[in-house]
Amino acid sequence: MLSYKHCLWFRFPYWASPSILGTYCLPGGQGRPQEIPFVHGIQDYLLIQKDETNWVTFKRQPSEHHRLMSRINKNVILALLTLTSSAFLLFQLYYYKHYLSAKFSQWKTSDGDWRPGKSENGAGLSKSKGSRIGFDSIQWRAVKKFIMLTTSQNVPVFLIDPLVLELINKNFEQVKNTSHGSTSECNFFCVPRDFTAFALQYHLWKNEEGWFRIAENMGFQCLKIENKDPRLDGIDSLSGTEIPLHYLCKLATHTIHLVVFHERSGNYLWHGHLRLKAHVDRKFVPFRKLQFGRYPGAFDRPELQEITVDGLDVLIPKDLMHFLEEIPHSRFIECRYKEARAFFQQYLDDNTVEAMMFRKSAKELLQLAAKTLKKLGVPFWLSSGTCLGWYRQCGIIPYSKDVDLGIFIQDYKSNMISAFQDAGLPLKHKFGKVEDSLELSFQGKDDVKLDIFFFYEETDHVWNGGTQAKTGKKFKYLFPKFTLCWTEFVDMKVHVPCETIEYIEANYGKTWKIPVKTWDWKRSPPNVQPNGIWPISEWDEVIQLY
């Protein structure tokens, strides 16, 4: 048995430090203090003196009260840790909002527009001479490699990407004053996106062979999309000939979409529908995000200019605004060449001198009308018999004796009559007024008439009016609502209703495929209905014959 000389109880609070604990532990009032290890919480220790210099401690089991206090202390510590973590998270959010958001404001402003180098305070493109910001992005690197490829292989391409062109257009003065290699920030080609679109002028491409292999050697994965040339559908021996329509060249996560523009006889550029064949990998790129290729498109032939963008020399359309306005309205539909051949196999074409002369005069009149309306900035489409001739037989109906155009009334301009008269087309008659049933007719040469019908939009349909000169009776022709597409007609790029079959059936019924040479404009159309009578007091205004 050991003999113990002194036994002392000490209670230490959880907040006491080891130095304080050791201050009160003296063996029998003599010798140096013996430090007791610090333990969190309230603990009881028994100090037992074995001899004059050797004291030992025995920890007494805590009471229920002590265990409760220990659990409370753990909860307090857990709460403090949670509070500290929350404070750190709030600091991170504050940092992101006030630092990173300000940094990205050079890309997107509060109005939702992408404006590189322009923050909310209106600062322009950065002129910093420090590090080259953004030039390590995959978008810029992919475009740079592609430009190197097309330049070395003399591939005639120009930039048509809507997002990048929109940015260039908004900041054109700054871009124009930027010389090659002088920019320190990537402000255009580094905008986040999956694709960058370029156009290839196929008729100017002299060396197609080999560039695919070179592209792959530069790290691109390329896909070529081909399909039938619609221009040859009317020629039996050439129908089915395939032509390149699109190239997709992928570098890592970014893809260059090369849209192949083909020259058409109407002096415009056309691209085809991107239609995937059965063997093509549908996961090669996110095809649904492509800006071009959902349908065929037609564009005026643009004049090009070279500029430096983010240190890269590229060609862009000189009239940027016009090209950007064309993109959403570029949808193109072909004439139905096969159906037209079938029509003429059943109904022989009229090749008499009179018919040929009318076709020639009608074509010249349409060209003159299109030129006049283009100067006025007034969009139009083929209507009535002219539209039927295009859709049914890809040409002018020789017994129609006139050219029919449609124009929405909101596009009417007060100088329209004088513009046509200045072009050598005198006014033949004017029916109705701008507010109701306006119709204009101009006299072309060789007794060919130009009829312009103005369309009025209602909630669920559109209509144009007609007036009987001798009685003042009004008529209304109802059509389902439609949009406009481009097509090629007598070597011209002109508009027709995209929903062509619905438009034609409204005006000519289900039997439109059968030629009808006797036509009563007041009774024959299935969509005609009476629309009242003009008051005699208004006849001088609404019934004008020349």
Image (tube, rainbow, N blue to C red):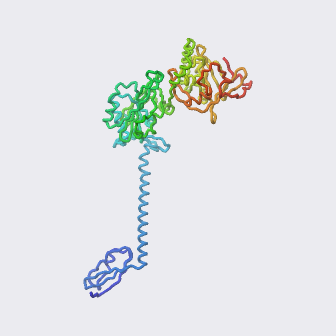
Farthest right residue in view: 536
Left or right of 287? Residue 364 is: right
Who is closer to the viewer here, 394 or 55? 394
Who is closer to the viewer here, 96 or 139? 139
In this figure, what is the number of numbered marks? 0
Above/below status of 78 relative to 156? below
Which quadrant of the figure has residue 44? bottom left
Left or right of 274? Residue 532 is: right
Q: Quadrant of the N terminus?
A: bottom left
Residue 477 visible to an observer of this rendering: yes
Q: Quadrant of the C terminus?
A: top right
Which quadrant of the figure has residue 522? top right
Residue 299 % position (x, y) = 47, 28
Residue 493 visible to an observer of this rendering: no
Which quadrant of the figure has residue 258? top left
Residue 127 % position (x, y) = 38, 40
Above/below status of 494 relative to 165? above
Residue 257 % position (x, y) = 41, 35
Left or right of 249? Residue 234 is: right
Who is closer to the viewer here, 182 or 244? 244
Who is closer to the viewer here, 208 or 473? 208
Left or right of 3? Residue 263 is: right
Residue 373 % position (x, y) = 55, 24
Farthest top residue in view: 353
